[in-house]
Amino acid sequence: MPPLRHLTRNFPKRAAELTDGGSLYWVVGGVVLVRQRVLEVRQDQEPDGSACAALVLDPELVRVEGRPMRAFQGWRYLDPKDAPPDLDAAGQAAAETMPESLRRELALLGLL
């Protein structure tokens, strides 16, 4: 089975930073909710044969404190001070027991 990867058109200029503890943060419904560690960046091919870069991702999703953010295209490098912190075990457990719609609403308000 091939590794879990996310394809992107351009090879990141700061690939070494991504593989040295960096993560890909996922914006879901206008809120950053989870991150995945980037394990490797490699040259790859799109299904149509065009060249691209592949971010090889850790399959574990790590919940982070929800933060409103518009979806974006291209690369965003977050300084550690700007990255949303991971939820601790108590926050993780509380978030998992709430309905998804409530989690998103609380995240949009900056409360989760």
Image: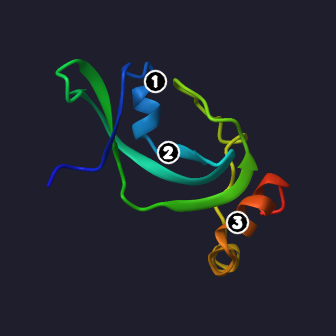
Q: Element type at marker 3?
A: helix
Q: Position of residue 99 (x, y in %)?
A: 67, 74
Circle 1 packing at 10 Å, graded few (<14), some (14-19), many (20+), is few
Query: What is the three-letter code of the residue carrying label 1?
Result: Arg
Q: Which mark is residue 14?
A: 1
Q: In this view, does 17 lie to the left or right of 98?
A: left
Query: What is the three-letter code of the residue carrying label 2?
Result: Ser
Where residue 5 sits, quadrant-wise, is top left
For marks 3 and 1, give the CA distance: 36 Å
Q: Is residue 112 left or right of residue 14?
A: right
Query: Which residue lies under the disc numbered 3?
Result: 101
Q: Which color scheme does this rendered protein use?
A: rainbow
Q: Position of residue 17 (x, y in %)?
A: 47, 32
The answer to whether residue 13 is above or below residue 107 is: above
Q: Is residue 40 left or right of residue 22?
A: left
- Quadrant of the image for the C terminus? bottom right
Which marked residue is nearer to the observer: mark 3 or mark 2? 3
Query: What is the three-letter code of the residue carrying label 3?
Result: Ser
Residue sitting at 53 percent across and 52 percent down?
35
Q: Element type at marker 2?
A: strand
Does label 3 or label 1 sit earlier along the sequence? 1
Q: Position of residue 61 (x, y in %)?
A: 47, 60
Does label 3 or label 2 sit earlier along the sequence? 2
Q: Is residue 18 left or right of residue 81?
A: left
Q: Element type at marker 1?
A: loop
Residue sitting at 60 percent across and 29 percent down?
72
Q: Which mark is residue 66?
A: none
Query: Which residue lies under the disc numbered 2?
Result: 23
The answer to whether residue 101 is above or below residue 58 is: below
Residue sitting at 45 percent across and 36 percent down?
18
Where residue 111 sits, quadrant-wise, is bottom right
For marks 2 and 1, give the CA distance: 13 Å
